[in-house]
Amino acid sequence: YRHFWKCPASQAHHHAYLGGLAIHSIEMAERVADTPGLNSTDRDIGIVFALLHDIGKLWCYGEIEATPFDKLGHDLVGLTKLNDALDILEGSWADAAIALRSLLSGQWKARGAKPLLAVGKIVQAYDQSSAEQDLRNRKGHRHQPWNAKPYTNNVREFSAYR
């Protein structure tokens, strides 16, 4: 899938340029790899999920032949396209295949979903952070995220309020 290296991560939002999908996906995987407090299993599953969370965009954003599934959105297209690989993984590490299917489908977000995967929320937070950072770096983009003003010491010292 050479298109992965040329595909944008979105059509008009974050990382919307050639190679944006690869840059975004690798950044996400690196962030998960560096997340403190994850055990090795959650880290491994999280890295794979981070790399593959937008893989369906290869079919949704052209250059690779579109399928009838592209109407489902990139999450379910990706899951559908990865089904054979997940079947193979299931033969050697069934729990990882189940976790990745849950994550890639979005089912982990459902109330009472099994398995309940905190790593999904970690990747989701990194996804939003990555998108916002990319948009901040592209000044004048119509989807500018809110930027908090940096702290300045314009108020009296805290001790004055005792």
Image (spheres, rainbow, N blue to C red):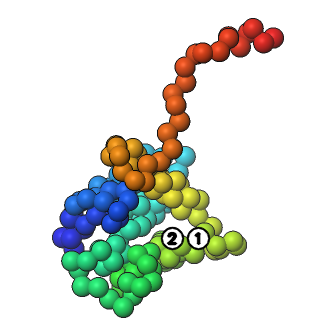
Q: Is the residue under label 2 in contact with that under label 1 (CB below 8 Å)?
A: yes
Up-down: is 68 above or below 50? below
Name the residue type under label 1. Trp
The local crowd at label 1, few if under 14, some if 14 to 19, many if 20 or more residues have their Cα within 10 Å, is many
Residue 147 position in % (x across, y down)? 49, 39
| Relative horizontal placement of residue 116, taking residue 12 as reference (left or right) | right
**N-terminal label among 1 and 2:** 2
What's the residue at 60%, 69% (across, down)?
109
Query: In which quadrant is the C terminus drawn?
Result: top right
Return the residue at label 1.
108
Query: In which quadrant is the N terminus drawn?
Result: bottom left
On residue 103, the disc is: 2
Residue 73 position in % (x across, y down)? 43, 78
The local crowd at label 2, few if under 14, some if 14 to 19, many if 20 or more residues have their Cα within 10 Å, is many
What's the residue at 51%, 27% (across, down)?
150
Residue 110 position in % (x across, y down)? 64, 73
Name the residue type under label 2. Leu
